[in-house]
Image: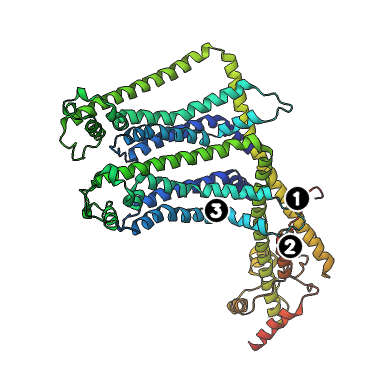
Amino acid sequence: MDRFRMIFQYFQSNSESVMNGICGLLALVSVKMYTCFDFSCPCLPWYNMAYGLGIMFVPPIALFLCGLILNRQSLVMLEEWRRPQGRRKKDLAVIRYMCSSIMQRAMVAPAVWIIVTLLDGKCLICAFSGSMDPEKFVGFANASPVQVQQLLAKVPCKDDELMRNNTSRKAVSRYLRCWSQALGWSILLILIMAAFLARWLRPCFNQAALLQACHWSNYIDIEQKIFEETCCEHSRLFAHKCILHFFESMRQEIKLHSFSLPREGEGAEGEEGLLRGITDQDQVNKLLKMWYYEKPPLDVSQV
Amino acid sequence: MDKFRMIFQFLQSNQESFMNGICGIMALASAQMYSAFDFNCPCLPHYNLAYGLGILLVPPFILFLLGFVLNNNISMLAEEWRRPQGQRGKDPAVLRYMFCSMAQRAMIAPAVWVSVTLLDGKCITCAFCTSVPVETLGNASHPGLSQGEMKRVLARIPCKEIYDGQEFIANEVAVRYLRCISQALGWCFVLLMTTLAFLVRSLRPCFTQAAFLKSRYWSHYIDTERKLFDETCAEHARSFAKVCIQQFFEGMSTDLAAAHCHPPRKAPAEAGETAEKLLGITDQGTMNAALKSWHRCKPPLHLHPPVLPSSNGWVGEKQPPAQPPVPRKEMAAYYSRV
């Protein structure tokens, strides 16, 4: 039992750390994915907006769902929410606490993706270059509307033959990048302020209820882990008894059918004990065959 | 048994982590394989589609099968599925649980391959370059080219060095268009997979939690039982071999004594354990004879009933009762030649 206690203490002190670790790992994966991803704006009038906004919003949704999937506590929370009441009341405050802590952790990776995207600027340039006002930029002011649309759509593609030496392209690009980075930094500032305020002001509002919710959510998590461990231990013992019972019943059968002298002296001593009365090739083959063709029933009450 | 118990507990509590680890390694291997693979579009009208779609779909299928092969539990599932019912009923829910959990893990590496392929864009560019809408992206009004010729020109889009259709549609425009479609498909695929995984994981506690707990327990039980049975058999085999060999040496030394017509030498009491371990074989000739006999005439897989061991471990003064005569005769016959 001592070993179990050590393991459970480890789990208890570390389930928060494990979840924070996964959260951090996902954030790093998010940055790595963005840098590995080869952003290539289509530079076509309607496709730009769809592509740019798609790259900005679809991966964060996938990352959010990944954050929920990888967090063990989300399953625990769902089980607690959906279980029948039985003899244990359900405390909605605990479920709400667990839900909010899961959501907060799951939001980190998507937020990192969006901020990195905005600070880089390519997505916004791709999405909104076609929506710029051509009057503001000298190079685009004197073209027909259709041509203007085409030209503006090609702004994100530096190497396009029409855009290669176009100074207005650089102007549009810089303008949009400036807006994108401003937006990125603002969002980062707002998120950090919100996190700071939430942590700082939390003790001012109902700290006792919070402590209770925190304690019981921890309890539910540990109870679940201990239940799984106990089931594992139980299934191991069950299997052990079942197999011993099987070997014993084989030995009885062999004794019944063979005429060899009964064993004298002490039973189960050293190697003889481990042999369990099965001492030749045919007996071993018969045992193995019985094991396959007729597994023993799942009932060790007679043992 | 204590040592085994610790190992089993470790394996059991960590079986899930072990399988997840293999799963993660396969996903990384899949991404690495794609980046190491040298994609070479053939740039010919019908070959492009076959090559592109082949690279997109065939490796994931192979990775899926590999995911099953590398999973230790597949043999357990097959055994449980095919065993005769006997005295123990079969629960199809347990089989379904085992199969589903294996299939879910095996799906990860193929999903990674397909996502990486689509997000990279080369496959779709190669496969669908002949279907680029030239009317909207370029100028299809250029005269003189039949459908077939046009297709041949468009098929060269992925191969920039030999592309000669710049006047119909610029190479960069076509590649950007196709890559945009490919990446959109890729991200949609990633979103779809994560949504499916999320739904599968989160709907289970809402509907079938009790049945799930049961299936999970019994599937772990079957695995534990199989491992314990293998361990017990290994222990038994070890003991069997030990007793068999001990009886062989004892038989040899008794035979020798009988052949040389003197009673078996009693080791002096003070020689103790070392003398016991020599098993009555104390010179080169005897040892060589024992080794030869072991090679030429291994003892049958039938252990003699054990006798009461005397204090110094010898068969001793009392002859063992009811020894099967056959092997003895063979050994005696062998010795008579010598």
Q: Name the residue at 37% across, 44% down.
A: B182
N-terminal label among 1 and 2: 2
Q: Name the residue at 66% across, 48% down.
A: B94
Judge left or right: residue A61 versus residue A156. right
Which residue position holds label 1?
A298
What chain is tagged by disc 2? A
Q: What is the crowding at mark 2: few (fewer than 14 residues within 10 Å), some, or many (at least 20)?
A: some
What chain is tagged by disc 1? A
Query: Compared to A266, does A134 lie above or below?
Result: above
- Whether residues under marks 3 and 1 lie with C-beta atoms below 8 angstroms apart, the answer is no
Which residue position holds label 2?
A290
Q: Give the amino acid type for the residue marked by disc 3 in the picture.
A: Asn
* Distance between mark 1 and mark 2 Cα atoms: 15 Å
Query: Compared to B147, does A128 lie above or below?
Result: above
Q: Nearer the viewer, residue A182 or B174?
A: B174
Q: Give the amino acid type for the residue marked by disc 2 in the picture.
A: Met
Q: Nearer the viewer, residue A279 or A237?
A: A237
Residue A275 appears in the rendering: no
Mark 2 vs mark 3: in front: 3
The residue sitting at the bottom extreme is: B337
Q: x%, y% of residue A184?
A: 34, 24
Which residue position holds label 3?
B71
